[in-house]
């Protein structure tokens, strides 16, 4: 599904990613771990096409197509979703209008008619339940006045609405209490199918306890220095990153 | 992010979809302004002597005035001798009967989405269509007449209801009011006249559609609305003009009289040609609009969505004389490229327990300048008066400007006057968040701007609200690259 080859990325002239190679197949969940500043968020931002980052070398393909040639909204239409680390507030724009614009943009891309208002509202009601999102929140402006936990739940709600094939969760667990974490993680798991994949960025094992990644990568200094099975996340939980750093001769 | 050149070009070429001209035989008088011209206009319209005298007084007074310079505007010098003050596209030819309308004119208004055949009309809306200096047609007149409602061009009103016109013309905006009001009073051509009799609730939205067509002319329309005791009317105004590389002058007057317990809603969607992306051409929109809430418990609301014109200078105002009268002003003003807007309102509280509300939303993009200018005056007689004002500015990009000039002048200590103001900017993060959800930047700007302007758009009648929403999106096309 996702193929990243020798990816080099700079922001404001400073190289952050220095040759990333990563392959995510259908149905797989990959965890991406590493200390702050290692380049995890940079990688997720580049995949979704954030304009601040410059790809200086390498390639990303998504289902065989050149992802770097697509605009951010096209990548979304093709099925890529980012659960933002810090979801932005958009005052005045109701969640309903926002989701409807997003949904109909995707449908247009797929050559479908816009969804009838009644069907759309019904779908919103159903999907809201997945993350136990309050009716109140769905009627408010996008993320405005939401608590940290509500914002994260709202991200997963949007994911449920848009049904992406590749979801990137950028520290979706940060700032969540135990109950909210469970709701978000269980919601995410309910949306999984053998055709959907995910890239999960996290510092903590507790989210991975729920999500059960197939592969765990460790990113240090803009490079993936270690890739292994789910046991790697447990080892990091116990021993931190220093041993990996030493192992890699860094 | 930088504006992309191709984008700017695209906007300049595409976005103003009303920029066409109509090829129609037009009777235009020679350029220039003098007493002779004023007399000629009056004569062409077959006016009574009192109206000619009104015009001449206004003209003589105008000659003593200088144009106002207090606006936050970079106004080009207007050569008043280089403008033609009367253009009549309905000029009768030998083959055409007096009642026939040139099919080209019908087509023009069709193209603008304003069908002049009643069977094709938007449901529940009567239209007075004005091109250049003359009213082309007023629909549904007979039907409205059944309830005693008068809806016709002001020229016809002068002929058919001279007493009403004479009683109210200039009673709200006297010709001595300001430079442009004096000019309009001297040379005004056409516009609409509305009279709603006592106790009648007007069953249709009344609307006037103004179109400038002829080159080198100015439009000086004049609208007069009188809403008698316990009556109600909702009135809409729309306007467009062809794309021309010279500036075109539009100096209008709207006067509204609201009697006891009566209510008037006046909505404008102003979409005059704004000039091109480099700031060339466009309409100079210099307008005096004022309502007089004469009767007790009368109500008046101005709602305006301003997206057009190279320069907008207008302050729809309310004089609240009647005890307990209520006035509202809701405004969205959008400026893009090199547009300049200096707009707002005046609320003059005279009567006891009068109330006014001002909600103003300015949106600036490109290199434009957008100013809110408002006056709240509470006279010593206005015991218990209240005003609430809220003025928000939204900036798109870093080369535009937003300004707020609130004036308060309170002479009664029981009055409560509140003013709130905010300035915000659409952030890259907001746009990217929308992009990531599959919403293009253009659509995202439209979504955010419409959300921002929602409080005002909600005040517009349904058909207008939809049109205005689309217009906001189109006007800002290419403003964020």
Image (cartoon, coloured by chain):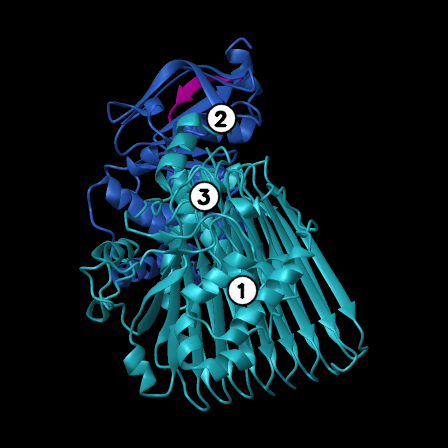
**Percent position of residue B431, x then y:** 47, 40
Above or below, comparing residue B24 to residue B429 in the picture: below
Q: Residues within 10 Å of mark 2 (few under 14, many from 20)?
A: some
Q: Chain of mark 1?
A: B
Q: Colour of chain A?
A: blue
Above or below, comparing residue A174 to residue B381 in the picture: above
In this view of the protein, can residue A42 be seen by the observer? yes
Q: Chain of mark 2?
A: A
Res. B107 mark:
none
Q: Which residue is mark 3?
A: B476
Task: Point out the stretch of residues depicted in magenta.
Answer: A221-230
Above or below, comparing residue B216 to residue B3 in the picture: below
Main structural element of the magenta stretch: helix, strand or loop? strand
Secondary structure under the numbered disc 1 in the rendered image: strand
Chain represented in cyan: B
Q: Which residue is mark 1?
A: B253
Depth check, front residue: B241 or A82: B241
Q: Which residue is mark 2?
A: A42
């Amino acid at each position: 599904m996702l193929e990243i080859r020798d990816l080099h990325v700079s922001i404001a002239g400073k190289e952050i990613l220095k040759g990333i190679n990563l392959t995510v197949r259908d149905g797989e969940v990959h965890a991406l771990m590493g200390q702050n500043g290692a380049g995890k968020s940079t990688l997720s931002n580049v995949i979704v096409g954030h304009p601040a980052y410059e790809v200086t070398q390498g390639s990303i393909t998504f289902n065989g197509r050149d992802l770097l040639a697509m605009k951010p909204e096209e990548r979304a239409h093709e099925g890529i979703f980012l659960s933002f680390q810090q979801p932005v507030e958009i005052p005045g724009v109701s969640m309903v209008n926002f989701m409807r614009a997003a949904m109909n943009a995707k449908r247009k891309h797929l050559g479908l008619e816009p969804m009838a208002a009644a069907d759309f509202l019904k779908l919103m009601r159903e999907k809201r339940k997945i993350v136990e999102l309050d009716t109140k929140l769905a009627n408010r402006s996008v993320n405005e006045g939401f608590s940290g936990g509500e914002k994260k739940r709202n991200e997963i709600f949007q994911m449920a609405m848009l049904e992406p094939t590749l979801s990137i969760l950028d520290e979706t667990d940060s700032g969540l209490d135990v109950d909210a974490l469970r709701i978000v993680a269980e919601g995410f798991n309910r949306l999984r199918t053998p055709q959907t994949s995910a890239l999960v960025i996290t510092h903590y094992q507790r989210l991975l306890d729920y999500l059960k990644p197939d592969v765990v990568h460790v990113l240090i200094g803009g490079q993936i220095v270690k890739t292994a099975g789910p046991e790697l996340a447990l080892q990091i939980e116990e021993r931190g990153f220093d041993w990996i750093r030493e192992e890699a001769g860094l | 992010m930088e504006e992309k050149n191709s984008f700017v070009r695209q906007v300049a070429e595409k976005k103003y979809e009303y920029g066409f001209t109509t090829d129609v035989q037009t009777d235009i008088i020679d350029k220039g302004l003098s007493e002779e011209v004023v007399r000629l206009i009056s004569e062409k319209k077959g006016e009574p002597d009192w109206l000619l005298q009104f015009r001449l007084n206004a003209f003589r007074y105008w000659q003593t005035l200088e144009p106002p310079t207090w606006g936050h505007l970079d106004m080009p010098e207007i050569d008043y001798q280089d403008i033609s003050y009367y253009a009549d596209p309905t000029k009768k030819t030998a083959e055409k009967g007096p009642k026939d309308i040139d099919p080209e004119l019908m087509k023009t208004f069709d193209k603008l989405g304003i069908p002049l055949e009643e069977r094709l009309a938007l449901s529940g809306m009567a239209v007075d269509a004005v091109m250049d200096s003359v009213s082309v047609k007023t629909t549904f007149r007979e039907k409205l007449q059944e309830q005693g409602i008068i809806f016709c061009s002001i020229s016809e009103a002068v002929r058919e209801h001279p007493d009403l016109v004479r009683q109210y013309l200039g009673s709200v905006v006297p010709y001595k009011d300001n430079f442009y009001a004096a000019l309009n009073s001297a040379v005004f051509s056409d516009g609409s006249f509305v009279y709603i009799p006592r106790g009648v609730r007007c069953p249709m939205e009344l609307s006037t559609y103004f179109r400038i067509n002829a080159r080198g002319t100015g439009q000086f329309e004049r609208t007069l609305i009188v809403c008698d005791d316990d009556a109600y009317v909702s009135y809409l105004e729309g306007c467009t003009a062809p794309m021309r590389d010279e500036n075109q002058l539009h100096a209008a007057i709207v006067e509204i009289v609201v009697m006891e317990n009566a209510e008037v809603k006046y909505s404008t969607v102003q979409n005059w040609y704004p000039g091109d992306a480099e700031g060339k051409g466009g309409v100079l929109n210099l307008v005096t609009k004022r309502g007089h809430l004469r009767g007790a418990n009368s109500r008046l609301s101005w709602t305006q969505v301003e997206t057009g014109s190279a320069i907008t200078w207008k302050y729809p105002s309310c004089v609240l004389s009647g005890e307990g009268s209520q006035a509202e002003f809701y405004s969205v003003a959008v400026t893009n490229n090199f547009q300049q807007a200096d707009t707002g309102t005046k609320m003059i509280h005279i009567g006891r327990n009068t109330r006014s509300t001002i909600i103003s939303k300015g949106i600036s993009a490109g290199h434009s300048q957008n100013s809110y200018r408002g006056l709240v005056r509470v006279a010593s007689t206005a015991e218990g008066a209240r005003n609430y004002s809220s003025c928000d500015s939204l900036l798109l990009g870093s080369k535009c400007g937003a300004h707020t000039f609130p004036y308060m002048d309170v002479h009664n200590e029981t009055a409560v006057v509140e003013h709130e103001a905010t300035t915000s900017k659409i952030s890259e993060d907001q746009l990217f968040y929308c992009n990531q959800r599959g919403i293009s930047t253009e659509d995202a700007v439209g979504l955010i701007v419409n959300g921002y302007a929602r409080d005002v758009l909600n005040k517009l009648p349904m058909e207008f609200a939809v049109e205005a929403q689309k217009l906001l999106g189109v006007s800002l096309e290419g403003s964020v690259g």
